[in-house]
Amino acid sequence: MDRMEVEMEVDKDLYSRTIAALGEDVVKAIAASNVLISGLNGLGCEIAKNVLLGGVKSLTLHDTKATTLADLSSQFFLNEQDVGKNRAVACTAKLQELNSSVIVKTLDSALEPAQLAGYSVAVFVDAPLKKCVAYNAFCRAQSPPIKFIRVDVKGAVGQLFNDFGPAFTVLDTNGENPHAGVVAHITNSNPAIVTIPNDEQVEFGIGEWVQFKGVEGMTEINGKEIKVLDTHMYNFTIDIDTTSFGRYERKSMNTYGTVIEVKRPKTLNFLSLEDNIKNPDFSRDPSDMGGVTDFDKMGRSELLHLVFYALDEYGQVHGQPPPLHDAAAAQAVLDLVKKAKAELGMDVDVDEELVRRIALSSGAVLSPLASIFGGIVGQEVAKAVSNKHHPAYQYLNLDLTEILPDYAALPAEEFQPKNSRYDAQIAVIGRTMQERLGKLKYFMVGCGALGCELLKNFAMMGVSAAPGGLVVVTDDDVIEKSNLSRQFLFRNHNVGQSKSESARRAILAMNPAFQLEARQDRVSPNTEAVYNDAFWEGIDGVVNALDNVKARQYVDSRCVFFGKPLLESGTMGTKCNVQCVIPHATINYDGRKDPDTKEAPECALHNFPHNINHCLSLGRSEFIGTFETQVSHAANYLGKGEAFVGEVKGKVWAADGSETPEARSAAKEAVEVLNGISDSFSSQGMVRSFEDCVAWARLRFEDYFVNRIKQLVFMFPKDRLNQSGAPFWSPPKRFPSPLTFDPEDPVHMGFILAAANLKAQVYNIQGYRPIRDAASLRSIVASVMVPAFEPRSDVKIDSGEKEPGGGAAAADDQSDWITQVRDKLASLPSLGSLAGQRISPLSFEKDDDTNFHMDFIRSFANLRARNYSIEEVDALQAKLIAGRIIPALATTTSMVTGFVCVELIKLVQSGVKAKFKDLQANLAMALLMQIDPEAPPKSVPRTVKKKPDPVNHPEYEEEEEIKTLPVEGFTAWDRIVVAEGDLTVQEFVDFWKTRHGLTCSAVGVVIGDAARAFYNLYMPGTKKNLPLKMSALYKQYDPEFAKTYFLPACSLQNDDGEDVETPTVVFKFA
């Protein structure tokens, strides 16, 4: 297939998340590949699923074995009716459904090495070593070599081996986006020193290579690949002599030099399987971990190499693998391990008891391990055909033996089969644990990619598949086309349907015994009547399958409050993590703060963009502000009328006319709302026909890309200096130029077309139908009268510079917001004048190419890019960036959910913290790092330093003692429950004195976004609340409140006046 043909077949909507993670070039390479998978047990099926979702050209499934009951513990596309049938033949039709564009073929007879000819990659699952050596030799002999992968899981351990040929080139070794920077100066020296602007930081590492572009003056440096020798915060040293080069200078104010990391190719010299068996080299591990995946298990990769070698030897001698729980066979394997150690000369301690336990359970394939290695191998296939990212080099061994019980301490019948689909798993963890899994009551939040994989594993493992068990899964989203490349439970006919309900139907086809309830309610403060106390108290635990931090934080807060374990995971392209949140034993999700994401300041977005991301961010902001937020407020005014006005007033003024405590902040927000309403119904904003919409769009073009730029350069001319005397327009600032509207320019007219259509949709223009021919609008555009623009000197623009007093130069004039609210309420258009008007807010949807949403944002961004001489962006990249599409891969999701389910087994087994493992992984480097969970941080008595007057006397500090209740400290898992009945505020204050000897100087609650003061010693107005019942006072602020408790915040001091911190206080009044 030639490249043009491949390019035509890549569906950018379907593979948008894959493209975001790997790049379009990788998707094209995958689409041209032919893959063979031999061995369709649970692991083989996992690999096939991920390869199919990746979109290969063809996939051949090979197997000579018949389905057994043991296969059903992990092979999700087989069932009891398939027992006795060839595994590959039995599951081909279901696998084909995953991707109809892939050619899927089946082989069910013995496979000879010569039959591998023509394949890009050959994957062998549970195949004898002797045969694999022959297959590998054939693959290496081809030109180019066929990429060879051998993989197997045995009980609680797994092994992967790669051979991509004697000279395999990796184009990108770590999968990270190239570091980049703006050049402020380059010295004429040897070596040269590069300086970047002070508001940036050097991101390059020592030993990396960089390339310069657009440097003026010192033009000789452009295009050269140069090594970084040393780095500091604002400069770095490069290995080049620039003494004879021209002097660096910035000649053009609308551009500057840039430097970007160069991803240098790396050639890997793979050795054959035969050579590696005898001389494994774990130092070739691309993660530089020496094959270590858990620092508690140093030397485990070497031991597992011997174990897998011994298991192969046992199979060759006895003609079959070691039978499950055969003590004699296990001893034979141990003897072979010792023999192999001597023969291979490996310096490794042999843990005899561990080897026996591995051998006793090695005949089982567990769904979680199949999921883990299915994800890893799926990604290795992508690397093999695309040369993108570093493959495992060459072994990857994984030990998850914490789940293996002490077999010798338990009766033999505990592990005997029950003639059920879970027999393989019973052989590993026992009947008792299987019964516990079956009776679990679990809550799964989210049913996207993570949810689909988790549900599949749950079904295979028998989670909640016994009487009394239940999994409740909820997701308020519906299925989109882009979901189909990684959310494998869904098909084309499911697009538009509920995710949770569609997943339920698909999962019950895999295991009808699974007790699964599907819901569509979002888990949030707004649904606490649905997911009430009884619901949370009735579940055993929670597994998150979410894709946003805010939802994770809320679920985490519920788990902490109700003392429920939470298994948390997430993915970002090839990266993923698992966190075990165990009550009182580990830190909770929200207790571990991620580093702040670097975001562009508002002044950069609005006035000084220097990359296309800034332009796209502002384009999205303008879309949401113009067509969603502002319109929503206007629609509320139309719908509610005086009630809406009353809501605005109620946030600023109390019933008696006095200002509320939040009056100023509420007033500022109200001014923005009222301005939006006024603009929506003003003569400039109101439209009656599509011609009006076109005229409005033409004037918006003039405002955005002409007038605002003229005003900016009027306020900040090209020769302006900043407060330090340096040029104001220093890098990374670009001096902008206004555009001149050109009806022949497709980007200009594209903006008009998109903006006019969106305006027509918002105002429900009678007879409106989408107009897609921009040329048809030219005559209307030509008739629009565009007023001449005169810049004003009284306009304030945020420059981002610090004022002499220490604050940033502000754009708002600090006028009286409360007075403005009063004036703007009085000037709102009367509802009578708007009779019959309908206005409908839009909701941003990035994945619909016909709705003009992304057309508006892309054209806006590219026009703004022209203002600032920034490189423009195509439709796909605009969608990825402005749509904030999270890079996502089926492979990463498959792997991470396998690790989650291993932790679930541990939770059911014992819940002992020492057994749990968090995970940090990156499939781009075959990096797996299991780490011990953190203990929950404890608030303890301490001394803190404070600056009483940081403005006038920042040098002066005072020490302050902080005490805790209880005195030994507390964690996020602890509580103080006040259950003394429905106390008055005074009685609640007295409780602290009589029970704990503390003075309660303030009591408050947070209701919604507002803090309400019940009592404050220093706010005399709150003393009137002292005789009131706490519950009655709460209900004054929240009349719909129906719980029997709430969480007051208390300010407490001891007799020495020292502040006393407490864990969460729960006030139960009924």
Image (cartoon, rainbow, N blue to C red):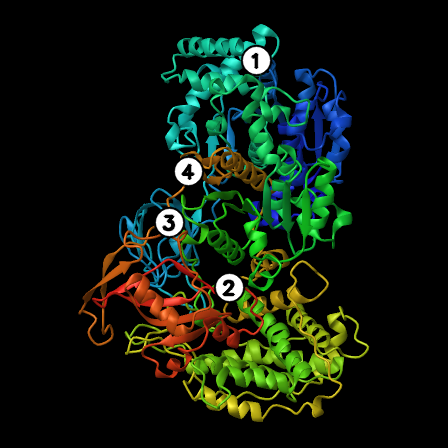
Disc 4 to disc 3, C-alpha distance: 39 Å
Q: Amino acid at mark 3?
A: Phe
Task: Report how far apart the C-alphas of labels 1 and 2 lie in the structure.
Answer: 62 Å
Residue under label 1: 322
Q: Quadrant of the N terminus?
A: top right
| Amino acid beneath label 2 | Ala
Closer to viewer: mark 1 or mark 2 = 2
Q: CA distance from mark 4 to mark 1?
A: 32 Å
User: Looking at this view, is 525 or 1001 the one in front?
Assistant: 1001
Closest to the observer, 818 or 983: 983
Residue lying at 49% horizontally and 84% vertically, measured from the top left: 652
Measured along the vertical axis of the image, is residue 116 above or below residue 1056? above
Q: Residue at x 64, y 30 (%)?
A: 74
Distance from Cα at disc 1 to Cα at disc 3: 52 Å
User: In this view of the protein, which residue sits in the foreground, 626 or 274?
Assistant: 626
Q: Which residue is mark 2?
A: 1070
Q: What residue did someone put label 4 on? A: 913
Of labels 4 and 1, the one closer to you: 4
Residue 688 picture location, percent across and down:
74, 84
Q: Nearer the viewer, mark 2 or mark 4?
A: 2
Across and down, in percent, residue 1034 comes to 49, 72
Instruction: Give the mark nearest the N terminus, 1 or 2.
Output: 1
Q: Nearer the viewer, mark 4 or mark 3?
A: 4
